[in-house]
Image (cartoon, helix red, strand yellow):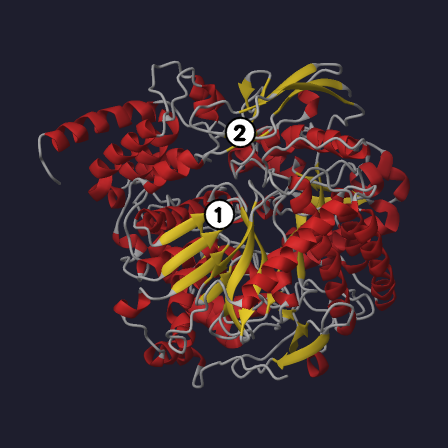
């Protein structure tokens, strides 16, 4: 298969950046999208052009490192990560536009790679249960109904790729934040810190420069882990209650 | 050189307890004075960094990914073993210990494996307390599943994403310590050398992968938690970035590399379909519960569509050879059997390297709905990658490199032969012998980080008060200079071939000569070819771009240089071990029935290799394995 690529090239964060055209020729239909780029890069090196930098690691859809916007859609057509997109999904001769995830809070690194450290800082703000190794009670001492455990798992499946923010017209990270708030807050062991957690994570999200949710639901449509937007509604309720209590001076 | 494994005396069940009772402690006020470097943020790295930080040590943690949450532990699917005996089905610490040591074909240390089994139950408690959403029963208790190599149900799981959930748990514990400023995190930073001061590991040299800045970091001790070396083979189930550089460069500084030839080839992966491929994808072992493995009896039938091959013309070779285990034969055995039938010319699919995993009978027996319920996500993944519908046509599978049991040599304290250098998780060699059982890798990574290193590191640190080396010491400048020179050298070669092409070449060589079966002649041939590849690499590699920016081609070139050198070590190790055991199968040493033939009289030892300087052959140091409590037996699955 052959494709015409328009690829975003940007040498450094301060460089203006622009689209460059490349031909992808003789691509096997079984190749993944990233393997197609590997082949293109091999060709670029052979003609002494700097290869296109893009992030990827596990290449099986779970690490969340790959992050391309393909024809305007984060991770491209179909649900799943960029690395799980296969070239047979395209037609021979297609033109394909490839850009980084464009989010103000994800500064450019180079070409298609961005810095998603903001997500780590949001987790550092409270996305954990304070617990000391060695102090845990027997795992079966705390019974958790299967339904609750399953719902917590639905939220915990988030891979932290950032497609939600890239798809959102407001560059909001609400789906990411609400997934973590939902995962930990549903479980009994996460409840003691839940109010503090939701307030500090949302505040960190705001200070990183992510926008607010205005119910476009674009995030849910592109999320490779299938996180539903209902977690955002749940977080909004908890945030409102917790921040009111905080401003009223009510402590846990 | 002799190796002291520092195994505590006494009965097997008492060793860890008696060690803990007498281990050196560091008081809380003194912990603050120590700084530790942790390289890698997978299960071993994150758990060690967070636990030591919670105790008051100052930690610097490094990872090559853009976030510690992306380490490749995240890709583990099946589960984590623990001797909880929640099922009341006869499990115990001793049974988990015995299954693991037998699964490793009696090539690991009794005391280490027993300790692993002993702390396994605490890992589950710890993870549940962190909020890991393990699968549960309707009554709210934790659920279990069974796994290979065991007759009890002791595997805990979180859907097909156990590794992800355990890593997110460890990452959140790490994040809590970053919030307390006890851990300083350095993502997108790659370790390129180890710094020794007076023979002690006191720091590392790293490259900032975004700016290219090469800098040094000093500490009181260094913990390598950098995973395995499966990517030496190029195609493996590892992530793109997994590499041997940290451990290999520590080896070049004097750390012994143990059992490099012990590699695990997983039987159920999606076969290679072309030379464009960047990795191989695992299909969970659980599929072999309902799938039947077969190839055509006659070569002529291999090009036919599977439904055109009549039932009587099919060879269900696992069922034929292993009556009692059938399609559930252990990993090393199932992998070799697949290779054998393909070597006979009876493989299916492109290049004849594949066997069928057929669900037709299961679908007939249970209905498609049940099969969908059990394995739906795997069938979807398979169809996504291959474009084939496995409900209508059998899957094609083939073995692929998955895990490496070998690693840097460590004693009972997880310290290498270099004082101050600790090695945890897949990066060390200590617990899995010649073959690892399913659901044990997660267990070992977390055991090392949460429950072993916090107790053992004090033995070393208690001798190191006030001995921290300043980053200005000449040893740091020397190491930094060496790294800078190598980086520049790679850029300056400006040859004709990409780093990737060399990686494929060395990987294919290893796969052909040091893969699923090995021969003395083949290994010797590989050892003759490797120096030529190395020479060509240093003359002919082409690295585009500059050091001072993100440059994946440069990163890759440095790793490939290490794979080439490391390949030599693997082949030498495989050549000296004149026996077959676990994942190491030497064709010359097999039973009449084609099974692995161990030689306990001569090879009951750990082979630890010592680097002897550039251009010289490494020397072999042996640590003999003394089985005091278990009698090594022949593994049989007939």
Between B601 and B174, the residue placed more toward the observer is: B174
Relative image position of residue A242 (x, y in whole percent): 18, 31
Q: Which residue is mark 1?
A: B163
Residue B351 figure quarter: top right
Relative image position of residue A188 (x, y in whole percent): 24, 43
Numbered label attached to residue B315: none
Task: Respond whether the residues carrying marks 2 and 1 are from the same subunit.
Answer: no
Q: Which residue is mark 2?
A: A13
Q: Is residue B400 something that shows in the picture?
A: no
Q: Looking at this rendering, what residue extends furthest in the left direction?
A: A249
On what subunit does the disc labeled 1 rest? B
Left or right? Give the position of B465 relative to B412.
left
Between B608 and A78, the residue placed more toward the observer is: B608
Name the quarter where the N terminus of chain B is drawn: bottom right
Residue B329 figure quarter: bottom right
Relative image position of residue B485 (x, y in whole percent): 68, 55
Between B136 and B218, the residue placed more toward the observer is: B218
Q: Residues within 10 Å of mark 1 (few under 14, many from 20)?
A: many
On what subunit does the disc labeled 2 rest? A
The residue located at (37%, 24%) in the rendering is A210
Kindly report the distance in space between the C-alpha atoms of the residues bearing marks 2 and 1. Answer: 34 Å
- Vertical arrangement, residue A127 with respect to residue B330, above or below: above
């Amino acid at each position: 298969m052959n494709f015409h690529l328009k690829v975003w090239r940007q040498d450094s964060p301060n460089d203006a950046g622009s689209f460059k055209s490349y031909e992808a020729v003789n691509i096997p239909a079984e190749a993944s999208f990233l393997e197609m780029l590997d082949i293109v890069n091999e060709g670029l090196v052979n003609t002494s052009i700097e290869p296109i930098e893009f992030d990827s690691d596990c290449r099986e859809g779970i690490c969340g490192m790959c992050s391309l916007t393909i024809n305007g859609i984060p991770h491209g057509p179909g649900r799943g990560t960029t690395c799980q997109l296969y070239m047979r999904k395209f037609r021979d001769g297609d033109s394909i536009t490839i850009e980084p995830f464009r989010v103000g809070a994800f500064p450019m690194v180079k070409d298609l790679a961005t810095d998603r450290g903001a997500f780590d800082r949001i987790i550092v703000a409270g996305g954990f249960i304070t617990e000391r190794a060695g102090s845990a009670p027997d795992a079966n001492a705390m019974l958790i109904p299967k339904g609750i455990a399953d719902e917590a798992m639905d939220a915990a499946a988030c891979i932290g790729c950032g497609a939600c923010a890239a798809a959102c017209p407001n560059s909001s990270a609400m789906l990411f934040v609400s997934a973590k708030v939902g995962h930990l807050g549903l479980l009994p062991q996460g409840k003691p810190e839940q109010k503090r957690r939701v307030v500090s994570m949302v505040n960190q999200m705001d200070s990183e420069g992510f926008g607010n949710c205005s119910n476009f639901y674009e995030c849910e449509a592109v999320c490779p882990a299938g996180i539903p937007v209902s977690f955002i509604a749940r977080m909004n309720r908890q945030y409102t209650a917790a921040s009111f209590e905080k401003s009223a001076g009510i402590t846990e | 050189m002799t190796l002291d494994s520092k195994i505590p005396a006494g009965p097997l069940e008492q060793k860890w307890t008696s060690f803990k009772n007498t281990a050196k402690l560091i008081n809380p006020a003194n912990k603050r004075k120590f700084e530790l470097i942790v390289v890698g943020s997978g299960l071993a790295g994150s758990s060690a960094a967070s636990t030591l930080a919670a105790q008051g040590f100052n930690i610097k943690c490094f990872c090559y990914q853009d976030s510690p949450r992306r380490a490749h532990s995240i890709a583990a699917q099946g589960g984590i073993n623990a001797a909880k005996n929640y099922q009341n089905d006869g499990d115990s610490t001793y049974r988990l210990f015995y299954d693991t040591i037998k699964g490793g074909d009696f090539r690991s240390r009794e005391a280490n494996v027993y300790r692993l089994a002993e702390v396994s139950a605490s890992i589950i408690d710890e993870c549940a307390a962190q909020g890991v959403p393990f699968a549960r029963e309707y009554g709210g208790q934790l659920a279990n599943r069974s796994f290979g190599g065991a007759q009890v149900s002791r595997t805990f799981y979180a859907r097909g994403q156990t590794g992800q959930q355990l890593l997110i748990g460890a990452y959140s514990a790490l994040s809590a310590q970053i919030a307390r400023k006890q851990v300083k995190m350095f993502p997108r930073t790659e370790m390129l050398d180890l710094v020794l001061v007076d023979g002690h590991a006191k720091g590392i040299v790293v490259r900032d992968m975004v700016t290219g800045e090469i800098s040094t970091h000093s500490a009181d001790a260094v913990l390598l938690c950098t995973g395995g070396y499966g990517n030496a083979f190029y195609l493996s189930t590892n992530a793109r970035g997994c590499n041997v550089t940290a451990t290999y460069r520590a080896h070049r500084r004097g750390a012994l590399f143990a059992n490099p030839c012990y590699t695990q080839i997983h039987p159920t992966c999606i076969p290679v379909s072309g030379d464009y491929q960047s990795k191989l994808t695992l299909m969970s072992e659980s599929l072999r519960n309902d799938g039947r493995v077969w190839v055509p009896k006659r070569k002529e039938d291999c090009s036919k569509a599977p439904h055109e091959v009549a039932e009587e013309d099919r060879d269900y070779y696992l069922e034929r050879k292993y009556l009692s285990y059938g399609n559930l034969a252990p990993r090393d055995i199932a992998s070799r059997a697949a290779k054998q039938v393909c070597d006979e010319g009876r493989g299916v699919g492109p290049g004849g390297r594949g066997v069928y995993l057929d669900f037709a009978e299961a679908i007939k027996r249970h209905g498609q709905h049940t099969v969908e319920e059990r394995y739906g996500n795997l069938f979807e993944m398979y169809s996504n990658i291959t474009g084939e519908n496995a409900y209508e046509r059998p899957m094609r599978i083939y073995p692929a490199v998955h895990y490496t049991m070998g690693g840097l040599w460590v004693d009972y304290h997880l310290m290498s032969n270099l004082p101050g250098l600790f090695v945890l998780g897949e990066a060390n060699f200590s617990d899995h012998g010649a073959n690892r059982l399913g659901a044990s890798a997660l267990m070992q990574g977390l055991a090392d980080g949460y429950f072993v290193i916090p107790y053992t590191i004090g033995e070393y640190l208690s001798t190191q008060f006030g001995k921290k080396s300043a980053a200005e010491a000449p040893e740091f400048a020397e190491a930094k200079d060496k790294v800078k020179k190598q980086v520049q050298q790679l850029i300056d070669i400006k040859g004709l071939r990409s780093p990737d092409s060399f990686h494929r070449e060395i990987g294919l060589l290893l796969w052909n000569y040091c893969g699923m079966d090995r021969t003395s002649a083949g290994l010797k041939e590989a050892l003759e070819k490797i120096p030529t590849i190395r020479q060509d690499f240093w003359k002919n590699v082409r690295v585009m771009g500059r050091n001072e920016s993100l440059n994946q081609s440069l990163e890759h070139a440095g790793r490939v240089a290490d794979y080439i050198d490391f390949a030599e070590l693997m082949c030498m190790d495989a050549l000296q071990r004149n026996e077959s055991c676990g994942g190491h199968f030497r064709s010359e040493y097999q039973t009449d029935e084609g099974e692995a033939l161990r030689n306990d009289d001569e090879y009951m030892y750990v082979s630890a290799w010592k680097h002897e300087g550039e251009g010289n052959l490494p020397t072999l140091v042996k640590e003999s394995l003394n089985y005091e409590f278990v009698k090594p037996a022949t593994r049989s699955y007939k």
